[in-house]
Amino acid sequence: MNKQISRLVNKIRKLEEDLEVELAKHQAELSFTIRERKVIFEEEILRQHKALKTGLVKYVLHARLRNLLTAPLIYSLSIPLLLLDLTVSIYQVICFPIYGIKRVKRSDYLVFDRRHLAYLNILEKINCAYCSYANGLIGYVREIAARTEQYWCPIKHAERIRAAHSRYSHFLDYGDAKRYHNHQQKIWFDSDERK
């Protein structure tokens, strides 16, 4: 990677760190803390949340017809999602130790903290859990795929890709055959995700 690209990647990392600091400040403004993965609201905020909760019957009766009609289709995706979760998890358990790749921690991607929101009724909490699972799973699978790609084919594309994964900046430039053959294994040793 050339020096200018390396500087830009470092700037992006610094901005991500700054974003984390600002998010923590905003979290404090919303009067909650997180202890051992459990969200704790101040009593007054919790009382306000409960007062804003929409009852289940009212929620269903006021739902848009298109939402009610498409909900079964949305939830039918749970079967392929569960199958994807199972197969990718088995894949990394078997293959990553063989390749010497550090396993992806599933719990870093699958987060179910919206259940602590007192202003959500049971159906809203179920919907939130489903979306958390689907999006968390996709992030988990993406990281497993990224680590696999870094092991097998750490070459950037000739065309710019949208939303490249976290490992992509470490890949070799497209068309750099000499570096590919001389330094292919070094890519893993430079990474923090090597066992």
Image (cartoon, grey):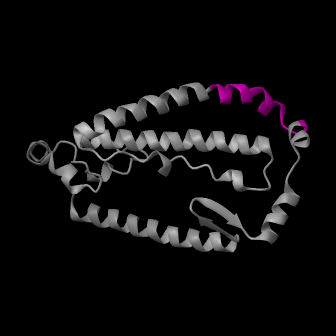
Locate residue 98, reporting x and y percent: 23, 37
Locate residue 29, reporting x and y percent: 68, 74
Q: Is residue 194 magenta?
A: no
Q: Is residue 64 magenta?
A: yes
Horizontal side of residue 66 vs 19, given as left or right:
right
Horizontal side of residue 63 vs 35, given as left or right:
right
Res 108 seen here: yes
Locate residue 156, reporting x and y percent: 27, 44
State whether the magenta stretch is mostly helix, strand or loop: helix
Residue at 79% from the left image edge and 70% from the top image edge: 43
Q: Which range is magenta?
A: 61-76
> Please, is residue 37 above or below residue 162 in the view?
below
Res 157 seen here: no
Residue at 86% from the left image edge and 42% from the top image edge: 56
Residue with the most extreme front position: 36
Locate residue 67, reporting x and y percent: 77, 33
Image quarter of the N terminus: bottom left
Image quarter for residue 103? top left
Q: How many marks?
A: 0
Horizontal side of residue 160 vs 83, given as left or right:
left
> Please, is residue 115 above or below residue 85 in the view?
below
Residue at 71% from the left image edge and 40% from the top image edge: 127
Horizontal side of residue 34 vs 167, given as left or right:
right
Residue at 73% from the left image edge and 56% from the top image edge: 117
